[in-house]
Image (spheres, rainbow, N blue to C red):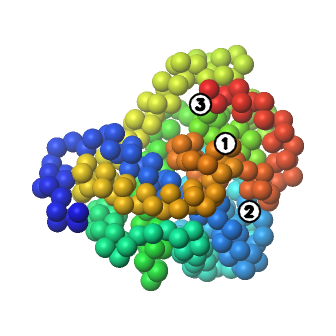
Amino acid sequence: MHLDALPDSALLGDGPMDLNAVRDVSRAVSAAHLFIYLAPESAEEAAGLGVADRGPAYLAFRSAAMGAVPWHVTLAAFYNFSPRAVRAMAGVWDAAPPERWQAARFLAAGRAMRRVNVHLTDDQLAEARSLIDPVVAGADYAGKVLAAANASLALPADPLAALWQQITVAREWRGDAHLVVLADNGLGPCDCLVLHTATGRLPTTLARATRQWDDEEWSAATARLVARGWLDSHGVVTDAGSAARERIERETDEHCAALWAPIGTAGARRFASLIAPITHAFTAAGTFQAVHGRSDLACTVLHVNGHAHDSRHLRGWGPAAAARSRRDSHDRCRCAR
């Protein structure tokens, strides 16, 4: 079913978007984007640019679309990382300019998708592009820094990598919108991360290791959430906290309804189904096996922002990562309820 076969209401965005469809396509987009942070091709391309540590490589790859920005700009755009985590990217633009990092990212995406045999026919690729291209072209990028930067890039010649990049724009657009909602709800960078882990959406080990908030900062954020009634005295999420977290996601869905309006509810659902083979191929290849000890993506598509819970992926994120992994294993089991 191509774009011209969709009903007029889908094409013209007549009527409100179905927010369940918005949530579903957002999950599909996040899942189809995620492999780039776990595939060995990314580490290989980063090593080829002279950066072997995963932390700086992640920051460089994801920041490259913005150009040779100082780490402070990346900190602002990424939101929930501590300054000490993002300072690790100092020097990445000396190793290679952003253009080379971006080209390497495209190469890694294409190589990885072919390694796991992502099966999309030419017709399916064309149909997927006929749906996502008007979404990207019609989006309002005011306040959407990472999405705008990615939308400004020339697409690679590789059709699989080009589709993945358009997916990336949509993924970053929701992420940028989510930050607006977090700020509106008074959730700062560390506070939102603590709530995220307490609701079981992100392993505490991963959050602490990659975002690098120290014990004092983490405890202060926990105390603020306890004062709001969103966590109990043991740091376990309350019913009010769970409801608040779902409300935040729903408000993000409401923001994102405008993003998908050019193709409507039917188009959004169709696009989600068209890109599902990307996720299926990487799942079958075991790429996500380490996430929460599961082979499926049920726990990875809700704004994990780029990593799986696997000690191999904590290397290069600072010397405290391994020790924190052991210490936080109890917290992870307690919070993922």
Q: Does residue 82 appear in the picture of this structure?
A: no
Residue position marked by numbered label 2 in the rendering: 54
Q: Which mark is residue 199?
A: 3
What residue sits 24% from the left and 51% below the top?
Answer: 266
| Residue 271, quarter of picture | bottom left
- Given the image, on which type of amino acid does mark 3 rest? Thr
Mark 2 crowdedness (10 Å alpha carbons): few <14, some 14-19, many ≥20 = many
What residue sits 23% from the left and 66% below the top?
Answer: 2
Residue 217, position in %: x, y? 74, 35
Q: Earlier in the sequence, mark 3 or mark 1?
A: 3
Real-space Cα distance between discs 3 and 2? Answer: 26 Å
Q: Are marks 3 and 1 in contact (CB under 8 Å)?
A: no
Mark 1 crowdedness (10 Å alpha carbons): few <14, some 14-19, many ≥20 = many
In the picture as drawn, the residue positioned furthest to the left comes out as: 8
Residue nearer the viewer, 275 or 70:
275
| Residue 23, quarter of picture | top left
Residue position marked by numbered label 1 in the rendering: 292
- Given the image, on which type of amino acid does mark 2 rest? Arg
